[in-house]
Image (cartoon, rainbow, N blue to C red):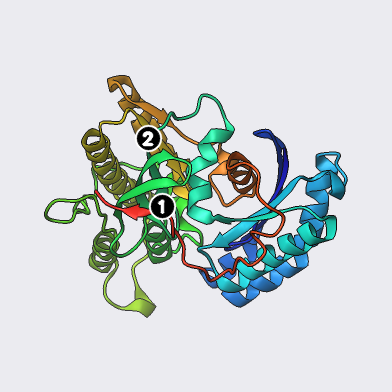
Amino acid sequence: MIVLGIESSCDETAAAIIQDGTVLSNIISSQHFHSDYGGIVPELASRAHLQSIIPIIAQALNDASLMPDQIDLVAATQGPGLIGSLLVGLNAAKAFALRIGKPFRPINHIEAHIFSTFLRFPKPNFPFLSVVISGGHTLLVHVHDFERYDILGTTVDDALGEAYDKVGKLLRLGFPGGPVIDTRAQRGNSHNFSFPKPVIAGPGFDFSFSGIKTSVYYLLRKLQGNELSNRTPLSETVIDDICAGFQSTVILALIEKTMLAAAFLRVRDISFAGGVSANSELRKRMKETAGTGYNVFFPTHDLTTDNAAMVAYLAGARGNVSNTSGYHAAAFARAWKRVRHGA
C-alpha cells in the first residue's frame, strides 16, 4: 500500500509518502518567521500553509518518483492543533483523494507521534509505554495496540516544551526555546543554580511544569533587579548555568515519573515522541536507564518534529478503508475519541 500523508497542525507544512512502512519521501517546511513574534501566530501560520501545501505535496510525489494516481490512500492530521492550520491540510488531502478517486483517512496528531518510532528498527513491542513530549503536550500513554490506549498522566498546566519556550523567553534566547536551552545547558554547570523539582503531591502520573518557570523568573529578578527597563545584564556563563540547572531538573522529573509508570504497568519497552524527545540530556540519561532491563526507543531527529511520515505510517498500519468513510471528518472533531482514560 502506498500512502500519502499530510500534516499541518501547527507551524510545519509537511507531506510524506510511505510504501509498506518504508519512507519514500518526507518533506517538511517549517515556518521560522514565528520567532520574530516570540510564539506561533495562528493567522500567519494558516496563511503560510495555504502558500506551501501544494508545492510540498508536489515535491513529495516527485521525490518518491510517483504519479498521483499511484497513491492508494490519502491521510491527514485531523487534530489536535490550530484550527486554521488543520483546515488547510485536511481539506487539501480530501481534495487530492477525491481527485484521484482514492480513500481518505483522518489521523489524530498525538496518536501519529506515538508511532513515529515505528519508522525505524528496532521498534517497540506491544504493549509499551509512550511518552509524548512537545510544545503542547506531555502525556504518558499505555499503548496496548493500534487504537487501544490508556492515558496514565498528562500535564495540569504547561507542557514540557511550553516550559522550555517560556524560560527561553525569560532568558531572551528567542523562540523556540528548547533547542537553544539544550545547547547552552551542555556548556553550563547544573549545580550552580538549583530549582525545585516539578512534582504533584499524591498518587498518579500527572506533571506540572509551570512552577519551575516561575522559579526561573524569581531567580532572574534576584540576579538582575526588579526594573524591567534597567536590568543588570547576565554573563553568558550565568545563562549557560541557568539553562543547565533548569534542564537537569525538568528532565530528571520527567524520567522519574516515566520509570514509575513503566514499573506500574510492568512494561519493558519505553518509547519517546514529540519535539522534546530530541533533547540531548533526555536521550543520554534514558540510554543509561536502558541497561537496567528496559528497552528505550527514540524517533530519528527528523521525526521528532511535526511531520507527515508518521501520519502516513499510521494510516497505512490500520489497513484498508472504504472510499467514503473518512471524507466527513472535521478538523474540530474531539481528539482521542477512542481512548480510554485510566491508570
Q: Position of residue 51 (x, y in %)?
A: 77, 67
Q: Residue at x 62, y 68 (%)?
A: 85
Q: Residue at x 50, y 62 (%)?
A: 174
Judge from the rendering whether residue 291 lies leftward or rightward of residue 112; answer left or right: left
The residue that mark 1 highlights is 236
Q: Residue at x 27, y 35 (%)?
A: 262
Give the amino acid at mark 2.
Phe
C-alpha span from label 1 to label 2: 41 Å
Q: Is residue 27 in view? A: no
Q: Position of residue 341 (x, y in %)?
A: 31, 55
Quadrant in the picture for residue 47 = bottom right
In this orientation, which residue lies closer to the viewer: 327 or 302? 327
Judge from the rendering whether residue 42 lies leftward or rightward of residue 145; answer left or right: right
Judge from the rendering whether residue 203 lies leftward or rightward of residue 139; answer left or right: left
Q: Position of residue 115 (x, y in %)?
A: 51, 41
In this orientation, which residue lies closer to the viewer: 273 or 341? 341
The mark nearer the N terminus, 1 or 2, is 2
Quadrant in the picture for residue 185 = top left
Q: Quadrant of the N terminus?
A: top right
Give the amino acid at mark 1.
Glu
| Mark 2 crowd level (few <14, some 14–19, many ≥20, 10 Å Cα) | many
Judge from the rendering whether residue 226 lies leftward or rightward of residue 228; answer left or right: left
Q: Is residue 202 in view? A: yes
What label does residue 151 carry, if any? none
The residue that mark 2 highlights is 128
In this orientation, which residue lies closer to the viewer: 262 or 180? 262
Q: Residue at x 49, y 50 (%)?
A: 111
